[in-house]
């Protein structure tokens, strides 16, 4: 007789996350007054001796991962805060390359709960403060903070950071930031600090970025002006700033523009780094969900591209890495993204589409996606079903791209990992 599985008790971390979801009136509540008041009370304004904050439409996670790898090779203790996660909340906080444990997350949440008193915090604000507490407790040397949304009013901007980075600028999060690229540039430049380095990896950014740096007296470093980079061969590239050059650098697994920006940020941070640290870091840096290959025959590639800007970069990568291949695409998106423009960017390189619905209030239905995929006739209830459908139709030499959202990639990655157990 087959027995029913014993129900698993809810973990303390899951209980905390459920609690945090419901203690504030909205999931996103831009503004620093509440979160800064708690941070000051808890002594979290400067969680480490060196803090680098990274904003941008795309490339934040990759830039942080590249800096993290270089710093770890140099022997620094490094904390990274990023969002969203793919599978587990623990992914949002890394210390020395490892996800923070459930126990340490819960300890940090408990501390913030005691410190906040009657002040309510959004889910992201609470998580940001808890991450800062974890970094402080673990006494890391360097903290790398990834901005959640915008910059000026994002919870991460309460921190007294040493270097500010903007990786890229494009229209996204229209509901919160609008569709004016000049306003978006100003919001992201809101992380700049007077008399401190401010790095911009976006070529020809809106004028509001440099103008704000000038207004507050930030030390502005613009790609193409104060620093530059170029490929030398298929496997090497060069980075240059003023009279300083790094030649024959290895091409990283992560986007080259972000690698160049990461090196510039570290160069201004007054840390003890060698050329060897940079080379080793570039070789080892990786990040789940960014051109991540999880299988061959057929090749399955996961990429979290979810807006036109990131889709454009993904298309260039597909053309370079998989020329003349039949490309199958599993896609599911959030309805507050520019679905049409994103799919329009991808369409020229996709042979077969496998659109799916996501779950949740922000999820786009497969019917919404199908409006922009008129020649597609296969629709799926979720990304797991879509990847299974793609596998039945793809030949061993073909490529399957999973794209459209962190949720899409996370669901397929979790399915694939469970399948291998």
Image: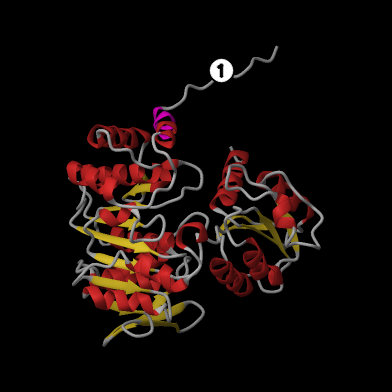
The answer to whether one can see residue 421 in this image is yes
**Lateral position of residue 53 relative to residue 44, left or right:** right
Please identify the dominant SS of the magenta region: helix
Residue 69, percent from left and from top: 35, 60
The answer to whether one can see residue 218 in this image is no
Residue located at (26% from left, 78% from top): 214
**Lateral position of residue 379 relative to residue 112, left or right:** right
For residue 13: magenta? yes
Residue located at (43% from left, 83% from top): 230
Q: Residue furthest top?
A: 1
361, above or below 13, in the image: below
Question: Which contiguous range is marked in magenta?
Answer: 12-17
**Lateral position of residue 146 relative to residue 301, left or right:** left
Residue 178, percent from left and from top: 48, 64
Residue located at (36% from left, 74% from top): 200
Query: According to the image, label 1 marks what residue?
Result: 6
Q: Quadrant of residue 215?
A: bottom left
Q: Quadrant of the N terminus?
A: top right
Residue 205, percent from left and from top: 42, 78
143, above or below 164, in the image: above
Q: Residues within 10 Å of mark 1 (few under 14, many from 20)?
A: few
Residue 168, percent from left and from top: 44, 70
329, above or below 98, in the image: below
Secondary structure category for the residue under label 1: loop
Residue located at (32% from left, 56% from top): 145
């Amino acid at each position: 007789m087959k027995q029913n599985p014993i129900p698993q008790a809810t973990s303390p971390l899951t209980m905390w996350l459920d609690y945090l979801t419901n203690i504030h009136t909205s999931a996103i509540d831009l503004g620093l007054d509440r979160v800064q008041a708690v941070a000051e009370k808890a002594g979290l304004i400067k969680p480490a001796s060196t803090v680098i904050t990274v904003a941008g439409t795309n490339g934040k996670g990759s830039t942080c991962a590249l800096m993290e790898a270089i710093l770890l090779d140099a022997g620094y203790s490094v904390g990274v805060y990023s969002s969203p996660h793919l599978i587990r909340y623990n992914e949002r906080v890394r210390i020395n390359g490892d996800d923070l444990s459930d126990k340490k997350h819960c300890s940090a949440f408990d501390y913030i709960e005691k410190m906040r008193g009657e002040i309510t915090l959004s889910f992201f604000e609470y998580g940001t403060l808890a991450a800062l507490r974890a970094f402080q407790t673990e006494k890391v040397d360097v903290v790398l903070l990834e901005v959640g949304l915008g910059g000026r009013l994002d919870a991460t901007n309460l921190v007294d950071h040493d270097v500010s980075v903007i990786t890229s600028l494009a229209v996204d999060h229209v509901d919160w930031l609008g569709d004016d690229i000049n306003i978006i540039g100003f919001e992201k430049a809101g992380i700049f600090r007077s008399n401190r380095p401010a790095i911009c990896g976006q070529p020809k950014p809106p004028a509001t970025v440099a103008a704000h740096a000038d207004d507050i007296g930030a030390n502005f470093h613009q790609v193409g002006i104060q620093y530059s980079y170029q490929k030398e061969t298929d496997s090497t590239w060069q980075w240059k700033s003023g009279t300083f050059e790094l030649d024959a650098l290895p091409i990283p697994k992560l986007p080259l523009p972000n690698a160049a920006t990461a090196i510039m940020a570290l160069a201004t941070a007054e840390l003890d780094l060698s050329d060897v640290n940079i080379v080793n870091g570039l070789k080892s840096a990786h990040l789940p969900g960014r051109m991540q290959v999880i299988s061959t025959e057929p090749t399955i590639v996961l990429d979290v591209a979810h807006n036109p800007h990131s889709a454009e970069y993904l298309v260039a990568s597909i053309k370079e890495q998989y020329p003349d291949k039949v490309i199958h695409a599993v896609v599911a998106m959030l309805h507050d993204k520019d679905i049409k423009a994103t799919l329009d960017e991808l369409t020229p390189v996709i042979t077969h589409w496998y659109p799916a619905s996501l779950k949740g209030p922000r999820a786009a239905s497969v019917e919404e996606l199908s409006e922009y995929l008129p020649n597609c006739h296969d629709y799926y209830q979720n990304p797991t079903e879509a990847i299974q459908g793609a596998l039945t139709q793809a030949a061993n030499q073909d490529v399957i791209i999973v794209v459209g959202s962190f949720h899409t990639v996370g669901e397929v990655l979790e399915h694939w990992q469970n399948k291998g157990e």
